[in-house]
Image (cartoon, rainbow, N blue to C red):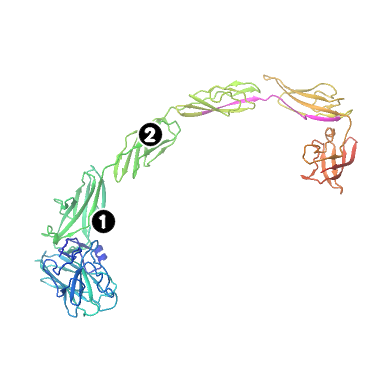
Amino acid sequence: MKFITLLVIGCLLPYFALRLKAQEGEPVLIEDFGSGTAQIGPEIGDGDFSTTYNYIPSQPGEGSYTIASSTAGMYPESWLQTGNHTPGQTNGYMMIVDATNSIDEFYKRTVKTLCPGTTYRFSVYVLNLMRQGGIKPDITFSVTTSLETKINHTGPIDNGQGWLEYNITFSTPPTGGDVTIKMTNNANGGYGNDVALDDISLRPYGPALTTYFGNDKTAITAQGCADANKVYTLNVISASDLPYANPIYQWQVNTLNGWINIPGAVLASYPLHQPAIAGNYQYRALVAQQGNINSPQCRLISSPVTLSIVNPEPVTATASSPVCPGENIYLTASAGDSYSWTGPNSFTSTQQSPVISSASAAMAGQYRVTVFKNGCPGVSPAVTVNVNAPVIANAGDNQMICKGDKTQLHATGGMSYKWYPTAGLSNPNIANPLASPDVTTTYTVEVTSNDCKAKSSVTLTVNQGPGAYATATREVIKGEKIQLHAQVSGENVSYYWTPNENISNASSLEPFVFPSSNITYILHVLQPGSCNLESKAAVEVKVIDKFIIPNTFTPNNDGINDTWQIDALGAYDNAITQVFNRYGTIVYNAKGYTKAWDGTYNGRRLPPGTYYYKIDLKNGTIYSGWVQIIG
């Protein structure tokens, strides 16, 4: 049969609880019955194994056993159809027993010459093969040394429990010696009491060994940088008292050739000088009774800790340069876990991409960053930031010009220029454009030099000269007079009308005129001074032979006769015009007649029909009659 040496420890506890509370050593014995596809015979192990059952090469009957990788096809109506227990083993074998009525020995083995004064753990996995019902297996496990016999009794094993681990923890006498392991059937034969056995082991056993770095008992990993020459303290402690009167330690490192002893590392605490070459390194501690440390079957082995040594990664840094005074300086470093920047003007930062606001000449120079990644520092090559000289823009002095005149602007301070607004400029992209704004305007120039910009403004105050304003057209009935209405603006202005005929006062803004035929009067407004400007406003006066009131109009928006057009009515500023519907409701009411009626009332078009009007010229003359709206 096949025997494999593994690292396991145990006690009379479930497996997962064991992993938390105990530590194992290398096995003295581990029997998993091997693996393969060929049929094997009854010979098991090295001859030290015995059983009172007969070997059968296929399905066993009562009082017999077989070695197979599966129960497939064996009593399929009553047995579980299953494979062996050994994790990860392909075609692994197990021992399958159909028990008898007698108190028989499933398994017996003597292990010779165990280490003195050492605690061991015997373990076996058992499976009740019955699907349901039947006689329940009942097994006694015993371990006998020269001093004592220790027993573990399963009691009836219920169906559906799966593989169950049973174990016994014992200590050897101070002189060591042999130990006998035995598994005995206590249940009756018949329908049931059929079991599978697998993964029988015997290993050194002790309390859990906690291995860690430094003072943190949870630190099972550490990381360092190549060439850092750092010392890491390896520590190992047990969860409870070790089962040795005089424990001794040995630290090991895992290499391509397996685990090897570290010379001189024989205490529970060991100062480890880190390797200089990058890689992952594993360390563990061996613990045994004094004199047994070099015997693999006498010592406990801790779980390993891992030290990762990495090479510092190359670090790069960039900077926005050159920058203009007042702008931001943008720095950035390659990715890492943390950062440490230094630079001119006492600059420091712990950001990956710091931003320095409002650049000045004092901030020019070299910047460096140390990037920490995976615990390793890397320093970038220096990056240089240049801060350009400030741009001093000057748009020139404010000016006052006459409307219609031109003046030249003069900007200085840069290599290129851009003026805005552009209205009134001959060329907004030169330093000295000609400017002729219609109104007072503030021009701003953006001056650029070495990609840096600055702004300056200049105001051109435009003397608009005097203003002249008058109604463009007036109508008057022949033989009557009409008053002109005008307004002026500006300081220190003078004004007069031309021609100076049929006018009551040519120097008045509201003179009366009484022309005999159509005529245009012009108001002249003068403003003396450096600009010597003049403004004019014309009023066309139409002379109408008589006052005619139309009695029809068609407000259909066709552009023909759409309004009630009454010539000369506009000449009577105080005239009151009213229109009534047949019920006497006023549908139109106006003082003066600056805008002809369009046949609407409150914004809505009136229906076609006859309406009645009353026009009071406020000079003693009143007209009344009817007007018809035709659809």
Q: Which residues are magenta?
A: 455-476
The location of residue 405, given as percent across then percent down, is 64, 21
Q: Earlier in the sequence, mark 2 or mark 1?
A: 1
Q: Which mark is residue 217?
A: 1
Q: Is residue 203 left or right of residue 577?
A: left
Magenta stretch encompasses residue 465:
yes
Determine whether label 2 and label 1 are within 8 Å by CB: no
Label 2 is placed on what type of residue? Asn
Tell me which amino acid carries mark 1: Lys
Q: Nearer the viewer, residue 112 or 307?
A: 112
Residue 51 pos. (x, y %): 14, 73
**Crowding near pointer 1: few (<14 within 10 Å), some, many (20+)?**
few
Is residue 479 positioned above or below 228 on the image? Answer: above
For the point 29% across and 72% down, the residue is 160
Q: Can you tell which quarter of the image residue 268 is in?
A: bottom left
Which residue was labeled with disc 2?
A: 345
Q: Seen in the image, is 279 located left or right of residue 474? A: left
Secondary structure of residue under mark 2: loop
The answer to whether 241 is drawn above or below residue 96 in the figure is above
Q: Is residue 19 magenta?
A: no
Residue drawn at the location 27% of the way across and 56% of the way down: 218
Please provide percent x and percent y for residue 15: 25, 66
